[in-house]
Amino acid sequence: MVSFDVCIFDVNGVLLDSNAANARAMGRAFTEDPVRRERVARRYLQLTGIDRGKKIRIIQEEIVGRPFEEGEFECRWEGFKVHGRLSMLQAPLGAGSIEVLTELGKRNIRRAALSNTPLKELMETLEAHDLTRFLDIIRGGGDWPKSESLRRLLDEFSLSPGKCLFLGDGKGDLAAARSNGVPFVAIDAGRGEFHGEEGFDGPFENLAHWGRRNLGIVERS
């Protein structure tokens, strides 16, 4: 594994086990119909590593099947913001999150959280899970690609891409890492997200799995 000075973590699906709950939240943001909600949720789970705005636009096109009416995009955005907030606050920590963050801190490796979730919502979520004390950098997203968020992070802190490591659970995360020259670690809890891809470390089931293999963390029995 490459030697690194900064470890960058995606939040949903990596630090938090929140993907399924967020998928249900997106379904509620779109419709009251349970069948269509399930369709939205299933599609959401396929759209990993993509910013919120793009997810909403894809679901609108593929499932709703018509252009947005005036103010409808904003309504979807705000609906997911409300429902997703509760989902994120209630989501469990990803296995190994605390142990890995703690070990990296002991080794003086900077720990960054990088999410497509807007910063205010992200901070609320991380504080509710008592994760902010384990993180040195926290940056959220918006209606722009993850690759842009990662580029901004590297530029803001003058980070050398080759000395960073980005841990994510989606092909969008992998694409962001590739476009910025950052080594990537794939986290995949059995979904086959990275099947057919190459040029990364893993996939690992979760951070606990990665921590055992790469940091020598022994899980408590």
Image (cartoon, rainbow, N blue to C red):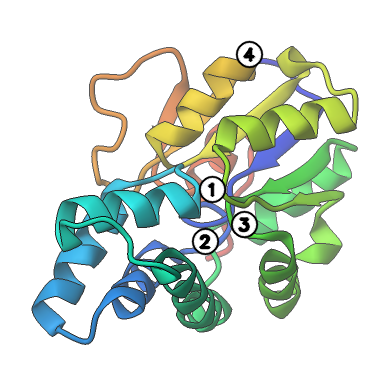
Q: What residue is disc 3 on?
A: 97
How far apart are the two marked residues, 3 and 2, measured between alpha carbons?
6 Å
Q: What residue is disc 4 on?
A: 181
Quarter where residue 202 is shown: top left
Q: Is residue 79 left or right of residue 39?
A: right
Q: Between 99 and 32, which is closer to the camera in this rendering?
A: 32
Q: What residue is disc 1 on?
A: 207
Quarter where residue 29 is shown: bottom left
- Which circle, 1 or 4, is nearer the viewer? 4
Label 4 is placed on what type of residue?
Gly
Label 2 is placed on what type of residue?
Gly
Q: What residue is disc 2 on?
A: 94
Q: Badge 1 local density, few (<14 within 10 Å), some, or many (20+)?
A: many
- Which circle, 4 or 3, is nearer the viewer? 4
Q: Between 96 and 41, which is closer to the camera in this rendering?
A: 41
The tag earlier along the polypeptide, 1 or 2, is 2
Identified at 57% across, 24% down, the residue is: 177
Mark 3–mark 2 contact, CB under 8 Å?
Answer: yes
Mark 3–mark 1 contact, CB under 8 Å?
Answer: yes
Identified at 81% across, 54% down, the residue is: 135
Quarter where residue 73 is shown: bottom left
Q: Is residue 67 left or right of residue 141?
A: left
How far apart are the two marked residues, 1 and 4, measured between alpha carbons?
22 Å
Label 1 is placed on what type of residue?
Leu
The tag earlier along the polypeptide, 3 or 1, is 3
Q: Secondary structure at mark 4?
A: loop
Q: Between 79 and 73, which is closer to the camera in this rendering?
A: 73
